[in-house]
Amino acid sequence: MKHFLDIHTTDPAELRGMIDAAKSMKDARKGQPKGALDAEQPLKDHMVALIFEKPSTRTRVSFDVGVRQMGGQTMVLSGTDMQLGHGETIADTARVLSRYVDLIMIRTFEEQTLHEMAEYASVPVINGLTNRTHPCQIMADILTYEEHRGPIAGKKVVWCGDGNNVFASFAHAAGQFGFDLTFTGPEPLDPEMGFIEQARAKGSAVEIIRDPVEAVSGADLVVTDTWVSMHDPQSARERRHNQLRPYQVNDALMRHAKDDALFMHCLPAHRDEEATSAIMDGPHSVIFDEAENRLHAQKAVMRWCLGV
Ligand code: CP
Ligand code: NVA
């Protein structure tokens, strides 16, 4: 069973194959209306369940459109409307859904929920974000970087801000795709050291540098994300803002990156908090290409999972 649960647990050659497949599927659609079917219909006769226990715009729409372009059908399910949200176990839900659908994508809170779904499902399961990781996002980000600047291997990626779930998947990807990663943020919001150690064990240079200017110097790619994630308590908002304000990505900071550095943000953004509008809409930014590439990258992930 090929689940797509995390980047560090997926074989690097297979990850590379997915990025290449995403690129060629994207190229093959150039000039087509968004609703046009792909020439190949690998998901014909396939039914895909998309489960959301948290809000979503990009993940929801890109998976739904991607399945349809490949000839499959979807059902988008809200966790609260399912018995899952009213006490039915994940294991039973996984076994029941596996009788109806060919593939399950789930966005949830605890990582344990994802792993239990994968353990008990008899169809592939895809991680659509947990409190700890967001691998589909980073597959889209790798595709985006490489479309603009060529191979990401050996490049310097700098993460500014909260050591959150999106950072974690970047750290997983650093090890698998062979790029270097610098984290700059306040110590209380450091990522789990385990994320950093696994990337180092695979040969990536991963550093924590408190001074954002020093960290961003010579960067090929600067990335940030919201200061308060969906699973963070709203009561932490003011404290987090105070801690993270020095790490805002703005013109003064971006000037220290390479001249041709890219800027990424998975979105949704809080404009003029973690990044200024001048940066988000400026010449370094590829944020909407990232959003588009969710579609293409995830189509490749789904094909890999299903072996079609
Ligand atoms: N980047 C991302 O996953 O966006 P959504 O929360 O809108 O799905
Ligand atoms: N870190 C953010 C990512 C949203 C796509 C969150 O978990 O809310």
Image (cartoon, grey):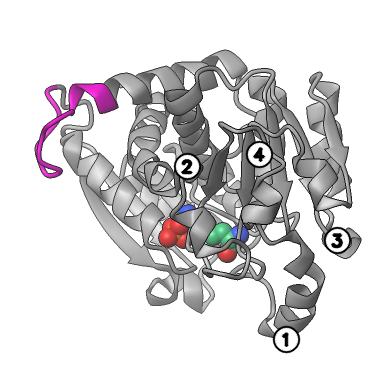
Q: Name the residue type under label 1.
A: Ser
Give the label, 1 or 3, closer to the camera. 3
- Residue lying at 39% horizontally and 37% vertically, measured from the top left: 298
* Residue under pointer 2: 125
User: Which stretch appears magenta?
Assistant: 26-39
Say if mark 3 contacts mark 4, CB within 8 Å.
no
Residue 32: x and y, percent? Answer: 10, 34
Kindly report the distance in space between the C-alpha atoms of the residues bearing marks 1 and 4. 27 Å
First of labels 3, 4 by sequence position: 4
Q: Name the residue type under label 3.
A: Pro
What secondary structure is found at the residue carrying circle 2? strand
Q: Nearer the viewer, residue 265 or 256?
A: 256
Label number found at residue 235: 1
Q: In which quarter of the image is residue 273?
A: bottom right
Residue 263: x and y, percent? Answer: 55, 44
* Residue under pointer 4: 170
First of labels 2, 3 by sequence position: 2
- Residue lying at 68% horizontally and 35% vertically, measured from the top left: 157
Give the label, 1 or 2, closer to the camera. 1
First of labels 1, 4 by sequence position: 4
Residue density around tag 4, few if under 14, some if 14–19, many if 20 or more, within 10 Å:
many
* Residue under pointer 3: 186
What secondary structure is found at the residue carrying circle 1? helix
Residue 111 seen in render: no
Q: Is 222 displayed left or right of 262 in the figure?
A: right
- Residue lying at 47% horizontally and 42% vertically, measured from the top left: 125
Q: Name the residue type under label 4.
A: Phe
